[in-house]
Each structure stands twice: as structure tokens, then as C-alpha cells.
Amino acid sequence: MKFAVIVFPGSNCDVDMYHAIADELQEEVEYVWHDEENLDRFDAILLPGGFSYGDYLRSGAIARFSNVMKAVQKAAEEGKPILGVCNGFQILLEAGLLPGAMRRNNSLKFICRPVSLKVENNETMFTSSYEQGEIITIPIAHGEGNYYCDEPTLKRLIENRQIVFRYHGENPNGSLADIAGIVNEKGNVLGMMPHPERAVDVLLGSADGLKLFQSIVKYWRETHVITA
Ligand SMILES: NC(=O)CC[C@H](N)C(=O)O
């Protein structure tokens, strides 16, 4: 299985993401610069965190016009797993691949610390290795993580079980309904503010993020017959 880590000017979690896939998950992974137009050779696409284009206008608002985003859109339509973490999530929202928008944290401060999350839906290609309702520890690091959408959208998210992770115990940023991560209707595009790639080894404080990447591999193996 081959992963792409998309790199925008200002990405700063691309190396963490690469490390998580190459060294902890031990799968093939390649950095892909934002002007790439073809992602056909990849099985899963990862949009890492950071400050693409310096967060000018709004986080992700400029990156979403990159050439590579047309290829990400195509990969999403083909049903490939697409994961956007933090700034990656913000770019997916700006690109319209996920519903809703991100606002400044209600404290107006950048927050960087581990948080507790509840796995709200373990029947997705990203969460099948977790228990339903499992409480996990994953770090956050953002200034704009205050997820918002209108009421009909929230209703749809709840009805379709598109809320995958919620903050547990304490909501660090004021996000609507404690939302920390959502999938699209089809279930193959996940955006989340917490950073699973920073929680892939107990030496980092938590290995709870690893199961997310393992779930993607499990899904891919179950849906692809290996003939070699
Ligand atoms: N770690 C990140 O991806 C940061 C995201 C974004 N720049 C913010 O501060 O909200």
C-alpha cells in the first residue's frame, strides 16, 4: 500500500506524518509537492498539519487552490482514503470536501497539548481498529480548531454517523457538539484537528494514533486482492 504526504508551502507536520507511515506503520510513503497534478499511483492521501501559505486569509483558504487539490478531489471521488489532519482538515473544509468551517479557538489562543477523544464511530475505514466509545489520547496544536456548521448540516452529520471523534471531558476550542473529527457522507474523507501522527509510539506519550493508520491498511487489504 502506498501513501502520499502532500506538502504545501508552510506545512510543518509532513515529516511527522512520513515518519508515522514509514517507520511505525512500515508502509510505502512519498512526499508530494503541492503542484503535482496526478495522484493515481497512490492508495491513500494524507494532508498534514502546518501553516500553509502562512494561514493568510483563513487557514487552508489559499492551499485549497493548489493544483494537487484537483487530484485530491479525484482520489476522493474514486473512494480512496483521504486523511486531513489539522491544517489538512482546514484545507479539506475550504475545498468543500467536508462540510462546515473552522473558526478561531474560543480562547483566541493557540493550544498545544494532549487531549482526550471519544471514538464515536468505529465503523469507518479510519477507525475499525478502535473499540466503539474508546477513549484515546491524541495531541492537538492549533489556533483555528473551533469547528462550526449550520443546524441542518449538524443534523445530517449526526444521522449519518459522520462525527467520528469528539473531545471527551473538556472541549479545548469551543467546537460545535464537541466535534474533533468528521467524515464525508461516503466515509472515505476524514478531517480531524488532533494529530494521530504525533501519537504513534509510547515514547511520544501515546500510541493511540497508530490504530488509525492501521485501520486504513486493514481496509485497503480487505478491499484489494493481492495476486503476487
Ligand atoms: N498544527 C496545525 O496544523 C495548525 C493549523 C493552523 N495553522 C492553526 O493554527 O489552526
Image (spheres, rainbow, N blue to C red):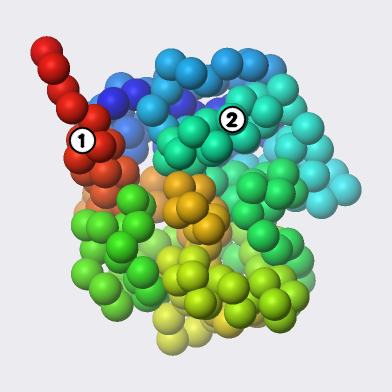
Q: Is 22 on the left or on the right of 164, as rendered?
A: left
Amino acid type of the residue tagged 1 in the rendering = Arg
Mark 1, residues whose alpha carbon is within 10 Å: few (<14), some, or many (≥20)? few
Of 138 and 224, nearer the camera is 224
Q: Secondary structure at mark 2?
A: helix
Disc 1 beta carbon < 8 A from ligand 1? no
Of 86 and 119, nearer the camera is 119
**Residue extending furthest toward the bottom:** 169
The quarter holding residue 109 reads bottom right
List the residue tagged with mark 1.
221
Q: Is 12 on the left or on the right of 209, as rendered?
A: right
Where is residue 51 shown, x and y percent of the image? 69, 42
Report the residue at 73% width, 62% height from top. 101
Mark 2, residues whose alpha carbon is within 10 Å: few (<14), some, or many (≥20)? some
Q: How many marks?
A: 2
Question: In 3D space, how far apart are the residues under numbered discs 1 and 2 (Cα atoms)?
Answer: 21 Å
Q: Is residue 199 visible?
A: no
Where is residue 160 shown, x and y percent of the image? 49, 70
Where is residue 74 shown, x and y percent of the image? 59, 30
Amino acid type of the residue tagged 2 in the rendering = Lys
Q: Is 132 on the left or on the right of 179, as rendered?
A: left
Report the residue at 26% width, 58% height from top. 128
Name the quadrant of the N terminus: top left
List the residue tagged with mark 2.
74
Above or below, comparing residue 190 to residue 49 in the picture: below
Q: Is residue 31 visible?
A: yes
